[in-house]
Image (cartoon, rainbow, N blue to C red):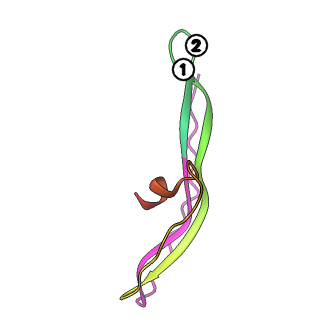
Amino acid sequence: MKLEIENDFTPVEPDPQYILQVNALKKYFPIKGGFISRTVGYVKAVDGVTFNLKRGTTMGLVGESGCGKTTAGR
């Protein structure tokens, strides 16, 4: 069994007005199962999150329990 990793990273020129730029963030966690704990699927923790943070501003990340706030923050 071969694991394929999707890499659709496209570098962008940073905008100097932002101290943090996140574009199309994705994080999937594997679901293990079976006798030898192989990957049988994935859980989408974060899929397509984009945000920018300007210097001197504060951002709040709000959502339901288990929606990926901590994963996006990391």
Q: Which mark is residue 38?
A: 1
Can you tell which quarter of the image residue 26 is in? bottom right
Estimate the spatial distance between the alpha carbons at disc 2 and disc 1, rounded to whole Å: 6 Å
Residue 29 % position (x, y) = 53, 39
Q: Quadrant of residue 3?
A: top right
SS at mark 2?
A: loop
Residue 58 visible in the snapshot: yes
As for residue 40 lying within the magenta part, the answer is no
Q: Amino acid at mark 1?
A: Arg
Q: Name above or below for residue 8 compared with residue 6.
A: below
Task: Indicate the position of residue 70 as horizontal and vertical percent values.
Answer: 45, 55
> Which part of the image, by quadrant, shows the C terminus?
bottom left
Q: Residue at x 54, y 74 (%)?
A: 51
The residue stretch that appears in magenta: 1-27
Residue 14 screen position, x and y as percent = 44, 81
CB atoms at circles 2 and 1 under 8 Å apart? yes
Estimate how packed mark 2 is, as few (under 14), some (14 to 19) or many (20 or more) residues with alpha carbons within 10 Å. few
Residue 34 - label: 2
Q: Is residue 21 left or right of residue 47?
A: left
Q: 35 or 6, which lies in front? A: 35
